[in-house]
Image (cartoon, rainbow, N blue to C red):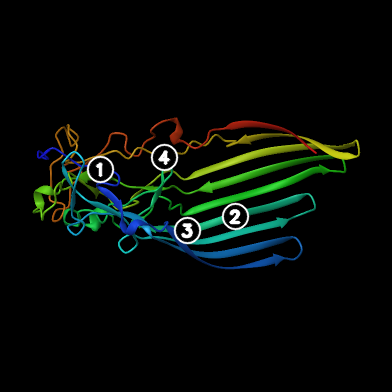
Amino acid sequence: TNNTQFIRSISIPGGTTVIGGGSLDSPNTDEITVGFSKRLASRGIVRVDLVHREGADFYADLRNLSTGAVTTPNGSRADLSVIVNEDNQLERTYDGLHTQFQYRITDRINLGGTYTLSKSEGNWDGETGGSGPVRSGILQYPEYHNPSFTAPIGDLGIDQRHRLRLWGNWDVFSGEHQRLNIGVLQTFESGLPYEAVGSVDTRPYVTNPGYVIPPASVTYFFSDRGAFRTDDLTETSLSINYSLKFGAFGKSFEIFVQPEVINVFNEDGLDSVDTTVFGPTNAGTSCGGARCQAFNPFTTTPVEGVNWARGPDFGKAVGEGSFQQPRTFRLSVGFRF
């Protein structure tokens, strides 16, 4: 139990990791919205909103000299991690211009749309699709990393700068018992940001101030946050809805049939990509046939191809799920009463 030379970390919930103060606040967002709307005679309406959001009370692991160390049940010593709320070093902001309109050209033709221009910036997304809120390590072992390369400020993963929806509906005929409607939807979404992120071992460049197990590696941004973008996506979809209304037993009933074609032109943009990055902590010949060279992250700017390298599939599809939904045919049949 005294041989900790090869231990990278020890984690025992309630033993090596505790909740600071016995409780936590949920991560939250403050929002300020200012908007106005305008009617277009009796046929339409336009609305514009300015939205500002700021995140707060993110989860973070606090582990420094003040939190001390503990003895685990098997007799090993480990640095204590305290889960706390943090919004001094972590930030997440959103600014958006939200617009929408609806307009009835004739009694049978309606147009509508929404457009959002936005920017999400900061150094912490704060959550993932698979697990929801996650904890930041920005407060762990502060002597061994610097926020400038561990958590730089830039475009966050949710920063979709442009988002457009335009639709039109045409009632070919609409009577007391029958209705036929044709709808068209056109969408545009700008790409999402990603970056070249790996890890480095800073232990050779830091004098251990008293930790039991210093971190074997820390996160390192080899590129700016949000330096790369996935493809812009466009999509045209078409739907036809036929409904038949009738009465029986003193009640009204409706049968409808709705065929749809999603992504009529079979656009195939990438909406998720491989982000593999090799660095000095990766074994193997990943930098020009040799192992990537170590460097002092506190004083040296790493060189691509020498100190780090993008994986061979970086920025490429990782599977069929990396592409937007292909041309899809759907048929819905329903009965309402």
- Identify which amino acid the numbered label 4 is placed on: Ser
Q: Tell me the CA gap for discs 2 and 1.
A: 48 Å
Residue located at (43% from left, 35% from top):
322
Q: Which SS class for mark 3?
A: strand
Q: Is residue 85 left or right of residue 207?
A: right
Q: Nearer the viewer, residue 11 or 180?
A: 11
Q: Tell me the CA gap for discs 1 and 4.
A: 32 Å
- Disc nearer the start of the sequence (1/4): 1
Place of residue 281 in the rendered image (x, y in percent of width and height, measured from the top left): 18, 40
How packed is label 4: few (under 14 Cα within 10 Å), some, or many (20 or more)? many
- Identify which amino acid the numbered label 3 is placed on: Ser
Q: Against 233, is 20 above or below? A: below
Q: Tell me the CA gap for discs 2 and 3.
A: 13 Å
Q: Where is the C terminus found, in terms of image quarters?
A: top right
Q: Tell me the CA gap for discs 3 and 1.
A: 39 Å
Q: Where is the N terminus found, in terms of image quarters?
A: top left
- Identify which amino acid the numbered label 2 is placed on: Thr
**Which residue is tagged 3?**
118
Tell me the tag on residue 272. 4
Q: Against 200, is 60 above or below? A: below
- Disc nearer the start of the sequence (3/1): 1
Q: Nearer the viewer, residue 253 or 2?
A: 2
Q: Which SS class for mark 1?
A: loop
How packed is label 3: few (under 14 Cα within 10 Å), some, or many (20 or more)? some
Residue located at (44% from left, 59% from top):
28
**Which residue is tagged 2?**
114
